[in-house]
Image (tube, grey):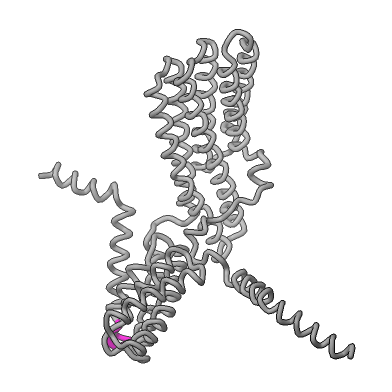
Amino acid sequence: MRNRWKRVRKLFADRSIWVRQILVTAIASGVAWKAGDLMIRDGGLVAAIICALSIRISLYKSVREGFGQIVGTTIGAGVALTCVSLFSFGFVSIAMTVLLCSILARALHLGDVASVNVPVTALIVIHPGLNESTAFSRLSSTLIGAGVAIIFSYFSHAKTPTARTIDQVTTLASKCAKLLGDMSEGVAMGFTQTQSGKWLARARLLAEDIPGLRAQAIEARSHAKWFQTSDKAKAQAQGLYIRGVAIEHTVVQVRTIARTLFDLSVTSGIEDKVRREIAQALSTVSFAVSSKADQIRNARSGNEAQSAIEDARLAGAALADSLMEISGKVEQEQIIRGISLVSNITIIADSLDESSPALHSVLTPGEPAMNQLLKISPIEQRARIGAQISRSTKPILTLRQRIRNYFRSR
């Protein structure tokens, strides 16, 4: 019985973050229902639905989701009210409501979140006997639900955005170090195409974590910028953002290394001397990435990590020297792919010590447009619409000017 209780407790302990989030969501939805019923007649259900849809694992994301719900409900309520007034409640009004809401969401360049919210909230609002007061009460219920979600989202995660960014950066770096270490051991023992294929598959999975890491780093930077934080915290958030980009570059190079090893296993293989040098270089790079992850995780001085990074550079240079020595004795393809590995190792080292100009001199894009609430900002949309109107009216204005000049000349 005691062992069974330990297993059950371990199930919840291993999923503490998930348990916390669902408990916060459940409590927030209940509070939204109660608040909606107290403030608006029969407004609790809509408030609870909007709260459950809006709450996310962080305050930053819940604010965006809540704003998306408000935008969606405002548009949806107006369209639903218009359709019901014109066609009465039924098949035509529901179909036209969903159609027009989808078209408006597309025309306004709303992101995926709000584009889904517009027709969904329109269907929540629409009901037999819909009138202006009903639409207004449901819009008010939406505001209540979104507000409750934003408040409770603060408690949905035990760690700050900066701490979550540190966790993601170090976790992804540790996975890279583990893969590099496995590739080093495999190359030293003589690897097969099947083994290198597994390395490449693992590297591709690591690359899929990049969008999540970037979004978390952006959240930490935005949180430090807009909320009451010290200058030290703001500097730390900016530094973590740069380190997130550095790990992103490292992941890309690790994937390229895995692809290069796979191509070598498919073609002619590798000479023993070159194979030993590659294994040694990959082992050294693995230790450098692991040391950098420990430095970030434990907030230690970077002396040990910097020493490991310099060792990685030296290992890459040694590999290049070995390749040059045997350049006339092996196939040209092996030399080319070997030099490619040297380049990957150098880029990883430059990324780890944050000395690469690519980290500081190149503007890194934010979240993909598909993940943003508004794919195009209202200011940019207004500028585009103004330019289109100007182009459309230009022929008319030109014709008027010509007519005016003609009569003036007479």
Kindly report the secondary structure that dominates the magenta region of the rendered protein.
loop
**Quadrant of image for the C terminus:** bottom right
Q: Nearer the viewer, residue 194 or 409?
A: 409
Instruction: Reply yes or no: does residue 165 show up in magenta.
Output: no
Q: Is 399 left, or right, of 90 in this rendering? A: right
Q: Nearer the viewer, residue 358 or 392?
A: 392
Above/below status of 16 relative to 153:
above
Q: Nearer the viewer, residue 334 or 253?
A: 334
Q: Is 30 left, or right, of 60 in this rendering? A: left
Above/below status of 163 relative to 147:
above
Q: Is 206 left, or right, of 45 in this rendering? A: right
When asked about the image quadrant of residue 51, the answer is: bottom left
Above/below status of 210 relative to 376:
above
- Image x and y of residue 24, in percent: 32, 64
When asked about the image quadrant of residue 133, the answer is: bottom left
**Quadrant of image for the N terminus:** top left
Q: Which residues are magenta?
A: 38-43
- Image x and y of residue 71, in percent: 45, 75
